[in-house]
Image (cartoon, rainbow, N blue to C red):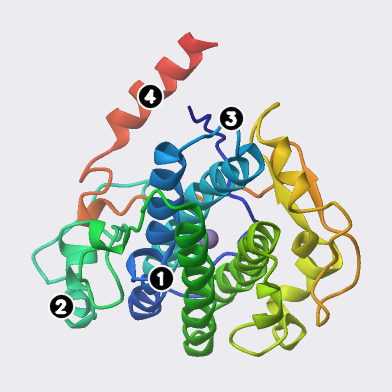
Amino acid sequence: MFMRVDKLQAELPAPKRKDPNAAAALQELLGGKYGEMSTLGNYMFQSFNFRSKSKLRPFYSLVAAITAEELGHVELVSNGVAMLANGPDNDGDAKDGGDISKAPFEDMKDIRLAAAFLSNGGGVTPVNSNGASWNNDFITTTGNVVVDLLHNFHLECGARLHKLRVYETLTDPTGREVCGYLLVRGSVHAHAYALALKKITGVEIEKFLPTPNINLDKIPECQKYLQEGSHRRLYTFSPGDYTEMAGIWGNGEMALPGDPPGELSVVEGMPEGGKIHQLTGVPSAFTPDYAPQEMFEIAEKLTKKAR
Ligand code: MN3
């Protein structure tokens, strides 16, 4: 089962301005073929379908624990997309929506993913940067441990390629931070699947890394995560389970040659994370409604009663 914590896995800086087309570019990392919906979907269903779980505990634990991290990546990218689509935090929801008869959102007809505004109110859905739906065909779960792990290794290298390209399109700090954090964590996952394959087959697949062949020290947004050692850690995302993966991620294995040196380790629990930014309501777009004041008052009373 899953437990939910009301935080993001990383602290995101507020966007400097509203930029729905930057949000659309970042959508590739959510609903693209190699996006976070795909890493989540692959590892989640592989973990459900895993054969001989009790006998293959280190390998099962690895896929199961990374599944939980990927769910948090879906959440992180989704927040980043919506933040870019909405712009800096403000208190724009204090009044009603005013006069809507003068096309207040004329600009929105020209954004790349118009449905993100027209249908989703500036929110996010599992589509790629062109608005094509993420779908089940991006999931591979064969029941063969080596084939699945090899697929996962390919998926993480493909995801790293996409993250690097999306990063190259973005100027706003919010989107760049999402890319920087996910580049570090995705590199961990590629490394972890390579080590898992090495334990089973003896083949040193980690020698493929980094793919693409660029070290994380070239990406300014990755530096604080490297300095704190995030590239050497895997989290269990559990109060007590999945620790057996330390036989793969640990056990004398070291950071990749191009990254800050040190031994790999498994951390019980989850990263400290960062706050979820407010998505301020826009009454003229009817989010959360045209005249939300009464709704706010009801919610305030209910919150007091819950205490
Ligand atoms: Mn991921």
Label 4 near label 3: C-beta < 8 Å? no
Mark identifier at residue 54: 3
Residue 78 location, x and y as percent? 42, 58
Percent x, y for residue 72? 52, 49
Q: Are marks 1 and 2 in contact (CB under 8 Å)?
A: no
| Amino acid type for the residue under numbered disc 4 | Ala
Which one is nearer the viewer's eye here, 121 or 3? 3
What whole-number distance in Å separates the C-alpha atoms at marks 1 and 3? 30 Å
The residue beneath circle 2 is 109
Q: Is residue 159 left or right of residue 225?
A: left
| Secondary structure found at label 2 | helix
Q: Is residue 174 visible?
A: yes
Image x and y of residue 184, in percent: 67, 69
Q: How many marks?
A: 4
* Label 3 or label 2, whichever comes before in sequence order: 3
Judged by depth in the image, the label closer to the viewer, 3 or 2, is 3
* Sequence-first disc among 2 and 4: 2
Upstream in sequence: badge 3 or badge 4 = 3
Label 3 secondary element: loop
Classify 214 as above or below 233.
below
The numbered dot on residue 299 is: 4
Looking at the rendered structure, the kind of residue marked 2 is Lys
Residue 135 appears anywhere in the view: no
Corner quadrant of residue 21: bottom left
Check disc 1 and give the amino acid type: Tyr
The numbered dot on residue 82 is none
Closer to the N terminus: mark 4 or mark 1? 1
- Image side of residue 269 versus residue 112, left or right: right
Residue labelled with disc 1: 34
Amino acid at the residue labelled 3:
Ser
